[in-house]
């Protein structure tokens, strides 16, 4: 039995002892945003177009591992049946054959702790993607998103190369979420700092979204053909979080994730409004297998890192 499930069962037993009111509050009820989160897509697009150079020719998705969580852990009040999800890494291929990686998957140990089925070939493809990338960014500092980088055999050299762009909060919270990581590889590393938006490559813009973790950020990508993607990281695990403006159960966000729940709810509300206003924008939640598969079937995402275009 994995650690997360064992803790969940213990907490559930406590809830049953306390009574139905606590169960409703911690498992079923989601709450509503108490604040707002501003997301100015017009400004993001301006920044994406402001950087000269080769444009994104294609976007690739590697399915690194498969796992499932109880549905209520993903969407408060959605029941206890397991919901299949996936851990992803994405690669942007530019027209000059350079590349960027968004999120780096999970280690074998991290997959085992999540009771996830690691695809060894996919993990190796991500490792090759890291080696060849001229830019690596992380949506946040959780081990199922940064694990592939932290486990990279030549991590010290990669951190010195300047290819890895961690923000200050991600760097500051590495030990909290990845205990025992190789601190020596980060000696002298200077993280990026920005207020709201930061263009980091032609067509690629970071969007600060702290809440799920202190270093959480979304990544906007515009291709040379004009296709637009917004990788939310774990602001939303699935599209239903956005469509219903509904958070994970409080049991999960308070006791296991340590989220700023109000911040995440405000971000979900902003994403909900953005999806309605921009139907051609492809919003990609952190672990939604259905969304990724649909984009692959439409030819908008290329499955796997093996192709160069």
Image (spheres, rainbow, N blue to C red):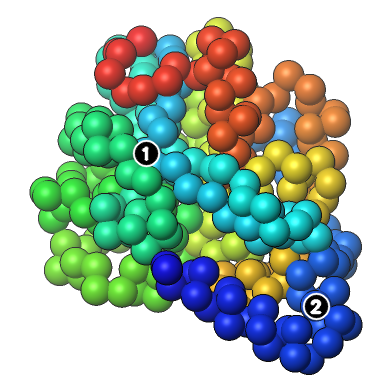
What is the count of numbered marks?
2
Seen from the viewer's position, the closer of residues 27 and 204 is 27
Q: Position of residue 244 (x, y in %)?
A: 84, 46
Q: Position of residue 241 (x, y in %)?
A: 74, 48
Residue 133 lies in quadrant: top left
Seen from the viewer's position, the closer of residues 234 and 87 is 87
- Tell me the tag on residue 165: none
Q: Name the residue: 54% across, 65% down.
A: 213
Does residue 42 appear to the left or right of 203 in the view shown?
A: right
As displayed, is residue 147 above or below residue 65? Answer: below
Q: Name the residue: 31% across, 74% down.
A: 179
Q: Identify the residue position indicated by label 1 in the image.
A: 64
Q: Name the residue: 57% across, 43% down.
A: 84
Secondary element at image label 2: helix
The quadrant the C terminus occupies is: top left
- Tell me the tag on residue 23: 2
Residue 12 lies in quadrant: bottom right
Seen from the viewer's position, the closer of residues 256 and 211 is 256
Compare marks 2 and 1 and give the one earlier in the sequence.
2
As displayed, is residue 141 above or below residue 257? Answer: above
Separation of marks 2 and 1 at Cα, in angstroms: 34 Å
Q: Position of residue 196 (x, y in %)?
A: 62, 51
Seen from the viewer's position, the closer of residues 73 and 157 is 73
The quadrant the N terminus occupies is: bottom left
Of tags 2 and 1, the one toward the viewer is 2
Q: Is residue 36 visible?
A: yes
């Amino acid at each position: 039995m994995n650690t997360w499930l064992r803790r969940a069962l213990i907490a559930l037993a406590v809830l049953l002892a306390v009574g139905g009111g606590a169960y409703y509050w911690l498992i079923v009820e989601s709450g509503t945003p108490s604040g707002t989160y501003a997301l100015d897509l017009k400004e993001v697009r301006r920044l994406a177009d402001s950087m000269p150079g080769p444009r994104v020719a294609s976007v690739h998705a590697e399915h690194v591992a498969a796992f499932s969580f109880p549905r209520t852990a993903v969407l408060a009040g959605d029941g206890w049946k397991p919901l299949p999800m996936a851990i992803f890494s994405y690669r942007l291929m530019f027209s000059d054959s350079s590349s960027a990686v968004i999120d780096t998957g999970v280690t074998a140990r991290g997959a085992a702790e999540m009771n996830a089925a690691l695809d060894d070939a996919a993990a190796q493809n991500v490792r090759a993607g890291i080696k060849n990338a001229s830019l690596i960014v992380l949506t946040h500092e959780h081990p199922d998103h940064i694990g592939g980088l932290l486990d990279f055999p030549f991590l010290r050299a990669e951190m010195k190369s300047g290819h890895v762009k961690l923000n200050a909060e991600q760097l500051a919270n590495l030990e909290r979420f990845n205990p025992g990581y190789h601190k020596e590889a980060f000696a002298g590393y200077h993280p990026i700092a920005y207020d709201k938006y930061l263009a980091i490559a032609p067509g690629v813009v970071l969007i600060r979204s702290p809440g799920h973790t202190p270093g959480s950020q979304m990544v906007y990508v515009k291709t040379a053909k004009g296709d637009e993607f917004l990788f939310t990281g774990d602001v939303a695990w699935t599209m239903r979080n956005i469509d219903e403006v509904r958070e994970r159960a409080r049991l999960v966000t308070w006791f296991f994730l340590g989220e700023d729940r109000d911040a995440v709810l405000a971000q979900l509300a902003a994403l909900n409004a953005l999806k309605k206003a921009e139907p051609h924008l492809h919003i990609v939640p952190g672990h939604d297998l259905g969304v990724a598969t649909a984009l692959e079937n439409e030819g908008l995402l290329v499955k796997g890192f093996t192709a160069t275009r």
